[in-house]
Image: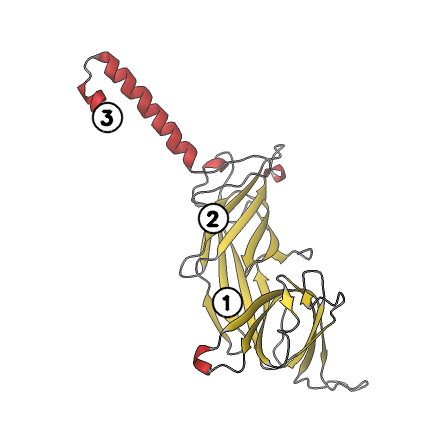
Amino acid sequence: MSYNILQNWKGPTSIIISFFIMLILLQNALGAGGFNTGDGNTSSGNPLVGNSFDDFQLISLEVDVFLNNKNIGKTQALEDQLVSVMWNASTLSTTNKTMTLSSETDVRGKSLFRIPPGEYIINIVYEGIPRNASFVMNSDDTLHTVNWTIGKLSLDSYQLEFKDERQEGILVNGDTLLMVYDNFILINDPFLVTLKMTNSTQGPANLPTITDGNLIVLNDDLAPVGSKLGIVNEVITQWRFSLVLTPVDTFFTTDLTIDNNISAEIYDVVIQGAILNATD
């Protein structure tokens, strides 16, 4: 309706009103996108457009995210994975502003950013579990590349030990479980174990999932299987892994029985071009 009224008005008054309307619309459009800076504020928009960094030299950052199936040795690009890059402007100036840029990976597993030199933290959340890695963007760089590879290992057999301390029949976050298994495939910094429990009495075509649960790895250890003290240059063909876990979701102890087929997958991460934060 307002569009038709403006079209019918004549004279300089209509020109002035039209100018102010266009100015308001332009301001709204600029405010809807781009980057917002501030103390702890999160930025949005296309990370390739560094319009909040006009006072700094901009350098290209490429984060490549892959998923490595350790059982078959196959690596593939991880598409649509959200990558966040956090920057503290105090590394270059007296300002205390922080900024977080986020972008999803493309079909090649690549996420691209244009950022100034400084100290950064990359954050990637996989299956609900966040991991952070730090790196420094030097002023003489033209391109900084970070390779972020998430490894997945499916287990054929393992032991799972736990104790129902409260006698409530449930395990919650904070309770601990011990997973022990033997394998010749090494894992590096495991952070996640997923369990999928299916009823073994159902037909193979329609195995219903009783519980899908994630567990955080609190601690891990490994030792050679059958190793003997004093033997030098022993060829190790099998490792015994011990993982201390705590549930993300609630587990019913009645589900953790031999009557259910419980498949397990362990996830680790290998990062090149950044240093994994030990406090994750």
Where on the picture, by quarter, is residue 19? top left
Q: Quadrant of the N terminus?
A: top left
Q: Alpha carbon of mark 3 to alpha carbon of mark 2: how far?
A: 40 Å
Q: Position of residue 108 (x, y in %)?
A: 41, 61
Q: Alpha carbon of mark 1 to alpha carbon of mark 2: how far?
A: 21 Å
- Asked if 57 appears above or below 258 in the picture, the reply is above
**Of marks 1 and 2, which one's residue comes earlier in the chain?**
1
Which residue occupies the foreground of this view, 268 or 133? 268
Q: Count residues near mark 2 (Cα–Cα under 10 Å), then give few for <14, some for 14-19, many for 20+.
A: many
* Residue type, numbered disc 1: Leu
Q: Position of residue 159 (x, y in %)?
A: 67, 79
Where on the picture, by quarter, is residue 29? top left
* Residue type, numbered disc 3: Tyr
Location of mark 1 (residue): 67
Q: Position of residue 202 (x, y in %)?
A: 49, 81
Location of mark 2 (residue): 113
**Of marks 3 and 2, which one's residue comes earlier in the chain?**
3
Location of mark 3 (residue): 3
- Asked if 144 appears above or below 224 in the picture, the reply is above
Helix, strand or loop at label 2? It is strand
Q: Residue at x 54, y 44 (%)?
A: 100
Q: Residue at x 47, y 42 (%)?
A: 44
Which residue occupies the foreground of this view, 255 or 125? 255
* Residue type, numbered disc 2: Phe
Q: Position of residue 113 (x, y in %)?
A: 47, 48
Residue 226 falls left or right of residue 48: right
Nearest-to-viewer mark from 1 and 2:
1
